[in-house]
Image (tube, helix red, strand yellow):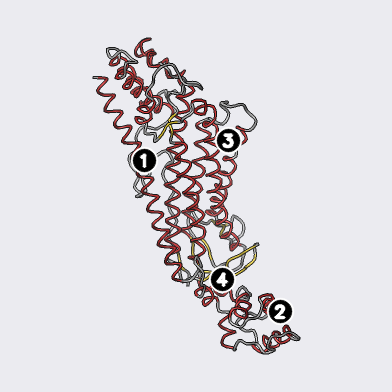
Amino acid sequence: MLVSTGTAATPGPDSRETVPTGGAVTAPGPERDEFFWLSEINKATTVINSQEGLLDPAKAPGIAAALQTVIDDGAAPDAERPSTVVSFEPLLIEAGGPDVTLLHAGRSSQDMHATYRAAILRDGLLELADQLNTTSRTMVDLAAAHTGTIVPNYTNGVAAQPNSYAHYLLGHAAGFERDAQRIREAYARIDRSAMGTTVLNGTGWPLNRQRMADYLGFSALVDNAYDASQISSMDQPVEVGALVTSIALHSGNLVEDVMTQYAQTRPWILLEEGEGTTFASSAMPQKRNPGLLNDTRSAASQAVALAQGPVLQTHNVTPGMPDAKEVDNNAEVVDAGVATLRGLDDVLKALVVDPARALEEINSDWTTSQEVADILMRDHGLPFREGHHVASEIVTVARDRGIGPLEFPYAEAQRIYRETVAGSEYPPELPLTEERFRAALDPVAIVNGRATPGGSQPAELERMLAEAGTRLTAQGEWITTSRDRIAAALAGLDQDFAVVRG
């Protein structure tokens, strides 16, 4: 019986929208681009400096009004949204006169740009984490639906042993869990404010760096002023690129494993046919090309290619150079990672597994043969290498004669064992009864009879499924908490800025 794992998902929302872990897409707010963050930095500077004696409170309302004008103008359709300090400031001067440059006390484009680059990467990491959680949840749910499905697994590109499809998928989910850990670790390093470090050694103005960080939703400060814009701004995109590379490699590994089945005449796993998943060949009527698999593999390759950009751009340049800092380029790396995960989510939802064909595939070869050697050693004391020789010779004879494990004559197994141990100290008769010999070659019994922690046995599958679900829930809560923290900080800034405007 064919078992469909779900319907292919429709393409996800644009990567610039906010997608909560719960799945619903919120109404898009202001685009959190460079213009947005320069506006927020200027708002926070207006509030903090007017309250702490660095800006004449009498001038603050006029400066705030000019800033609001620039923000409102930038929100209009097709409006100019400058992305640099030197292109933003002329608009401020035009709206409020030269007094607006009083905001520039102790600031530089170096620390302002470093701050918005970190803020934009921070948003991108949360989006990447969210999609990773969604795709991982699909994978774990698929595993839960296939705890009893026994399939061949492969090593070195060759069928190796039978396994539960659930166990196989949980192995892939474990790789994605490490990617989730890496995202959280990278996020903590990127979620730091550079504001107040000026160019590279701080400033003589007594700026309140902590209040600025709090208003912008950062959890910490970049401690060393030189590090802020000269070092960390260069290694942040490299670290994000490494994250995206790992995710793309994990995704590509799974896709390629599925693709291997498409080379067979009778695959045990396919894509559910339909628009967006498969397409008919333009010349060969019998072909149903796995378009979704091809597209997802291509997306993963594109992600890997883009992710190398920051490494090459940062290589052999002096500290602080702008080569690897371009916001659009680095956002493209994150977007490529998100696109890969969305494609893989669609793949997982479109997979169709044929458990009977999978079992037939296992029984058509000798992927269960190691169990014979294991039983001879575990239950009868025969050294593993001797038992391996017995099992290996059985396989050789069987393949020469075109015999599968279900039909192999018990008498032949007895003969091979007897000849293999001849002249040794071990009893000459095969210690396995025919019933035990047949059971040793049963893939279902092998998979269910594993005894080690982390194995494919039902009790361990149940444990690993539960723990995977718990981790995904915790990751979702972390994403929500991180987003809420930023949103609350920006909302508080809006409230205080409104008070200054009067």
Label 1, label 4: how far apart the Cα atoms are: 43 Å
Residue drawn 37% across and 24% down? Answer: 208
Tell me the residue that label 2 is attached to: 393
Q: Earlier in the sequence, mark 3 or mark 4?
A: 4
Contact, mark 3 vs mark 4 (Cβ under 8 Å): no
Where is residue 305? Give x, y as percent: 60, 42
Q: Earlier in the sequence, mark 3 or mark 2?
A: 3
Label 1, label 2: how far apart the Cα atoms are: 61 Å
Q: Earlier in the sequence, mark 4 or mark 2?
A: 4
- Tell me the crowding category of disc 1: few under 14, some 14 to 19, or many 20 or more residues within 10 angstroms, Cα based: some
Dot 1 lies on which element? helix
Q: Earlier in the sequence, mark 1 or mark 2?
A: 2
Residue drawn 53% across and 44% down? Answer: 244
Q: Residue furthest front?
A: 425
206 displayed left or right of 402: left
262 displayed left or right of 453: right
Tell me the residue that label 1 is attached to: 483
Q: Quadrant of residue 74?
A: top left
Query: What number is the disc on residue 115?
Result: none
Label 3, label 2: how far apart the Cα atoms are: 53 Å
Q: Earlier in the sequence, mark 1 or mark 4?
A: 4
- Tell me the crowding category of disc 2: few under 14, some 14 to 19, or many 20 or more residues within 10 angstroms, Cα based: some
The total number of labels drawn is 4
Tell me the residue that label 4 is attached to: 162
Label 4, label 2: how far apart the Cα atoms are: 20 Å
Tell me the residue that label 3 is attached to: 310
* Amino acid type, residue under disc 4 in the picture: Pro
Dot 3 lies on which element? helix
Residue drawn 39% across and 40% down? Answer: 17
Dot 2 lies on which element? helix
